Amino acid sequence: MRILLVLILPLYLFSQSVSLKTLIHHAGKSNELIEAKQINIKSKQQEVEAAQSAYWPTLDIGASHSYVSPNSIVSPGQVSFAYAALSVDLYDGGRKDALLRGKDFELEASQFEKIAFEKSITLEIVRHYYGIQKLKATLSALNERSVELKEQIKRVKKFIAAELATQEEVDKLQSVYDNNDYTIENTKLLLVTSEENLQLLSGLSAKHLKSNHFVEPKNIHFEVFENTKILQANANAVGEASHAIDAGYRPQVNLSDTYNKSHYDDTITGGDSFLIDNQNKLMISVNMRIFDNGRMDKESEAVKYKKLALQSQIAYAKKEQKMNFRLSNKSLQTTRTKLKSANSALRAATSTYSVLKQKFEVGLVDNIAFLDALTQKTLAQARYKGTIYDYEIDKSIYYYYAGKDPKEFIR
């Protein structure tokens, strides 16, 4: 029965565990901050539709009732009035076109903003995901060290009874054991903190994680990522705002048709013949701004400077991304070298510990040499595992600065 349990338990835990890609996909559906970005997109879509509606004619209706005293032959005591007015802009200098294009660019910027934010959330999830793996590896090494120290304490206590060891040796081992126990508890706290952060980001429990890795980068081409595209879309929107202001100096042509119906009470005899009870008015109007002391010119110029400022930010953002792309590639190379070094250090520390443990147990070396070897082995184990996970994080950062979506390279 025990053997069967040992075989089934790992399979059960694996079936309950979640993969890195699952965490990222679930975050896209459940993370409230990502949802806020999606709501912002919907808001911008409504603004686009509102700008499109501006091309349609407008229809207004209204009514009023008035009472005056005293009345006169041309001014009845009571007047009820209702009207309907249809109006359409035949030409506005391109203002509506510019405003619509501006709203389209704002919508585009909000879409890029959501993608960019999702990628930043992906990097955060990756960082916590592999951070948890690192902490678990450290915890495993510390627990292994704890077991070893406990066994050695028991062994030395037996030697004390046979007067082959002193209490000082036990106290030294006990001190190291207690300090190791504190380090374990502190590591557990860090582990729980990372698990809680990962659950907050993804909306899924991070207690049991599947093992995933990123594809080894090969022939990755650089692309401008969304943060720069956001700036470009905003610059385009600002440029259209300038065109909308400039349209104010062009002719504005409007066609309108107004029908009104009136009803009169309390009129003086004979006054009805002077009053019109219904009327239709068709009107075309043209107006054009001739002078405003350069107000709209200055407003347009101010907006153009904002666009120039954004274009400068775009140029800097591109340089910054290319720099980070080069540095992330260099970081990958450095971590590969570090991984080889950590692997060699682990083999050396394991070998040294094995030799010194045998010598310590037969009294050929003191507990200081043994504890040092045990410490070096524990650190080497944690460092090697940690470097493996750091390399995965570095790969995700490399894909990010290459302008890619890191989650597409998870295996």
Image: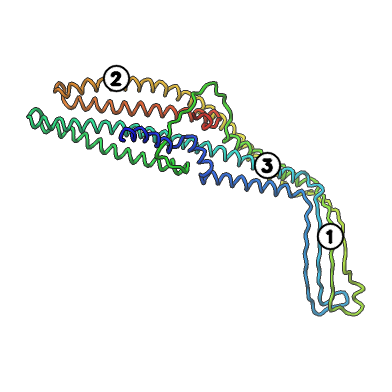
> Where does the image place residue 183, in percent across and percent down from the top left?
28, 37
Query: What's the mark number on residue 348?
Result: 2
Residue 309 lies, with reference to residue 259, above or below; the image says above
Q: Earlier in the sequence, mark 1 or mark 3?
A: 3
Decide which of 346, 3 is in the foreground and name it.
3
- The residue depicted at 45 percent of the width and 44 percent of the height is 200
Q: Quadrant of residue 2?
A: top left
**What is the distance, in whole Å, between disc 1 and disc 2 at their CAs?**
95 Å
Callout 1–callout 3 Cβ contact below 8 Å: no
Give the CA distance from mark 1 to mark 3: 34 Å
Spatial distance from mark 2 to mark 3, Cα to Cα?
62 Å
Instruction: Tally the numbered discs.
Output: 3
Question: Which residue is farthest front?
Answer: 1
Tell me the tag on residue 104.
Answer: 3
Question: Mark 2: which amino acid?
Answer: Ala
Disc 2 vs disc 3: Cβ atoms closer than 8 Å?
no
Q: Residue at x 67, y 48 (%)?
A: 47
Q: Position of residue 125 (x, y in %)?
A: 46, 37
Q: Is residue 257 visible?
A: yes
Going 84% across and 67% down the picture, which residue do you hit?
261
